[in-house]
Image (tube, grey):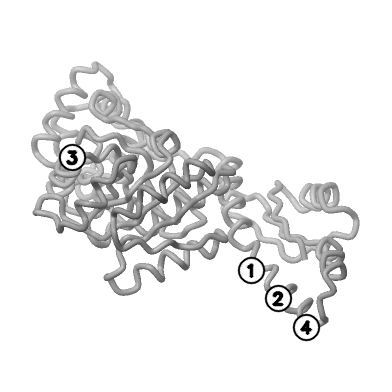
Amino acid sequence: MHMRTFLAKDMKEALATMRAELGEDAIMVSSERLKDGSLCLRAGVKQAQRPEVVATGASDKEEGAAADLAPHAVTFEDRYREDLLSRLRSPKQKQVAHRMRFERASLLRLLREHRTPKSVAVMLADSAQNSGLEDMTLALAAALDKVMRTDSAGAARDHAVVLTGPPGSGKTAVAGKLAAQFRFAGRGVVLISTDLDSAGQVARLETFASCLDLSVLPVAEAPVIPDVLSEARRTQSVVIADSAGCDPREPLAPEVLRFLAVDGLQITAVLSTTMDAEEAGEMARAFAKLGAAQLILTGLDLARRKGALLALAASGLPIAYVTSSPYLAAGLETVTPLAVSRLVIGSAPGSLARDAA
């Protein structure tokens, strides 16, 4: 059965779209009301698969197996498409429930409650004051705009990236999300795992790859990479390498250094916003010295205090993407200084949130 997902404001519109795209023989499989009030309808048409089965002379048993596999083959694509359309169609959420008048002392107190490093907090507060803006959110956004760099096109410009970062930062999930992003943009993708020693790392990447109809290429030695890059350039494919976890502030293992030194492989650091803010800033600066070109930030859904996010925003390394979900279909998102400011002001912990309410 050929499956499709449709998003509409109500059942009438969803059914009309379903029939227009799949014909009168389409069968509604399920419907679900989403959080934004829109309707998600899943439908399929049996006739799309049957001619291929007859033409190949498949047995009844093989035909049944193909039918069993078909829903699983479209599950990720449907979820990915559904998530993108839902984000595009859903009304803009008001992220800050109240407006706060700018006061330097209040901003400093808020930044301290977010566990922002002192040097970063003072710098942002001074810059926000100099902006002359009366709204706290806009003043902080103006301060962030002076130090925060973004570069979501960086990964698209370069045909090959190696993801590096400390253990548990989310490199493997980011590799899968990047692969999904390029796949749905029509690009070929080569997924590489260079971490063959950590238990379960290759298997986890293979789990993500199977959702995208990709395979994982295990690479134990860095000298193999140039040949992979050469073939990828020939086929205009993107290479995404998932590497072993490391602390850039300490001497790195020789094999890790060899992978990071491969010519043509852009270093992208993956760091979690749940870590200590001082540690986050130190790691970003250390990765910059190793040649990292950009950051991908994870864990925005888990970090109540945004000190690490602010430290990374002020680190000087461009932020390519952020992710606030561990699920592959949720994908990667871009971020702006205003979005970061809203996250910080809108999630003010402790006494400041109570005072402003």
Alpha-carbon span between mark 3 and mark 4: 64 Å
Camera-nearest label, 2 or 4: 4
Which quadrant would residue 127 be assigned to in this image? top left
> Considering the numbered disc 4 on the image, is that residue within a helix, a strand or a loop?
helix
Residue 138's label in the rendered image is none
Camera-nearest label, 1 or 3: 1
Give the residue type that dot 1 points to.
Answer: His
The residue tagged 4 is 61
The residue tagged 3 is 111
Residue 68's label in the rendered image is 2
Camera-nearest label, 3 or 2: 2
Give the residue type that dot 4 points to.
Answer: Lys
Residue 72's label in the rendered image is 1
- Identify whether 126 is placed above or below 351: above
319 and 179: which is toward the camera: 179
Give the residue type that dot 2 points to.
Answer: Asp
65 and 24: which is toward the camera: 65
* Place of residue 354 in the rendered image (x, y in percent of width and height, measured from the top left): 25, 46
Q: Is residue 357 visible?
A: no
> Considering the numbered disc 1 on the image, is that residue within a helix, a strand or a loop?
helix
* Place of residue 298 in the rendered image (x, y in percent of width and height, measured from the top left): 33, 51
| Disc with the residue nearer the chain's start (3 vs 4) | 4
* Place of residue 98 in the rendered image (x, y in percent of width and height, measured from the top left): 36, 36
Give the residue type that dot 3 points to.
Answer: Leu
